[in-house]
Amino acid sequence: MFALRSLGKMVWGSKESPEAYKIDTGVLYEVRPDTRVPRKCLFKDAELVIRRTTVPFNYQLVAVRVFEEGEEDLADNGQALDDERAFLIGAELRFTSATIDNAAGFKWEDASGVPRVYYEFVSDAGSVTAEKRSQFALAVARCAWERQNRESYTAADPEEIDRIVTMVEDEELEQILMNAKIDDEELGAMEQPVPEKNPKKSRQPSGPQLPAPPRKMKAGDITLSVLGGLYIFDPSKTEFVMVAPEVTLAVVNPAKYEYWINVVSDECKYLSQVIDPGMNAVFNHDYRSLIWNYFDANGKAYSFSLVADDDEHYDTMHQGMTRAAYETLNQEPWKKATVSAQDYMLDAYEEDVAMPTAPEEWDGSEGSEEETEE
């Protein structure tokens, strides 16, 4: 028996999801540098919004299309409308203020797929002040800090937030300096360094530290098993880097309403982790990916991603893990939820999915009074 109060409480644990911050007017561009059309306008009239998700301390950056008169009527005629782009806010988004086409705006990256995609939002100088843009960038940085630390930004040192705001700008300046050309006269004036007699071999840069491997993998009935590439978020690069090109992610059921994920390859055991709300799992169908959090015995946080080998493996992972999360949190079988409720939950934790209306049984009142099946 449980109360059907909100989707998040039913699946991963969460709150309501109102829009928090908004830039009212701008143009959204998509940038794919290595394609035939490297930059295209997606929405010529758009709003940029920070939206709470149903997962605690998780927020989305959402570009929402503003329709011209009559455009929305097309949906009534059965034509699908591309009306928003949504991105989970984290340090990997690399969100920053920028000057684009001699106009002020923002840019960010979608690092969840390969190759990555870049986005630009050019704001309307006549209606969006510099102060409002700064406040918006600060709000995004606070959201990124909350997702990383799983607590309110009010507990953060202000310098930590400032570092998130300036990190991308500093990296871009460094890249510009590295790529700067020096003319021949300047080059000739420079002193040539004296080579060392016994130079030491330079160390190759190492990747992010992985958590200690599990001493033993959790055993139980295997409810799903999928193949894919394993990635870990590297804070120094603010992006996901590959750990292993081919691993198996399995969900095991050691006891009633208890589920674990085991991630292994032929060479290594990576994770054995209980499925619970703290994972903050987010799925992305376009990239066939799952992103989730892992905390080691000392409370240190890691963010992992698994990119499924194909659509079939992705669908198996998405459906199976959503079902496991539901049963873990509610201590009742998945089949007790109606078909419409199941569909809603599957859509809710997928990025860039147009959300349907919540089923009628989720009206804030108490839900089913049936006894839990044994």
Image (spheres, helix red, strand yellow):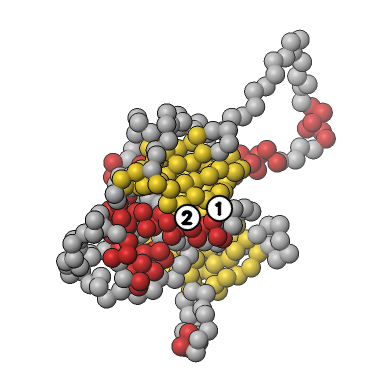
- Where residue 366 is drawn, which disc sits there? none
220 relative position to 94: left or right:
left
Residue 304 placement (x, y as % from top left): 48, 44
Residue 350 placement (x, y as % from top left): 44, 61
Mark 2 belongs to which amino acid? Answer: Met
- The residue drawn where x is 71% and y is 61% is 35
Helix, strand or loop at label 2? It is helix
Does residue 18 appear anywhere in the picture? no
Helix, strand or loop at label 1? It is strand
- The residue drawn where x is 82% and y is 28% is 188
Q: Are marks 2 and 1 in contact (CB under 8 Å)?
A: yes
Note whether 365 is above or below 201 in the view shown: below
Q: Name the one closer to the observer, 112 or 319.
A: 319
Mark 1 belongs to which amino acid? Answer: Ala
- The residue drawn where x is 47% and y is 76% is 66
> How far separated are the C-alphas under marks 2 and 1?
8 Å
122 relative position to 24: left or right:
right
For mark 2, what is the residue?
Answer: 317
Q: Name the one closer to the observer, 52 or 24.
A: 52
- Where residue 308 is drawn, which disc sits there? 1
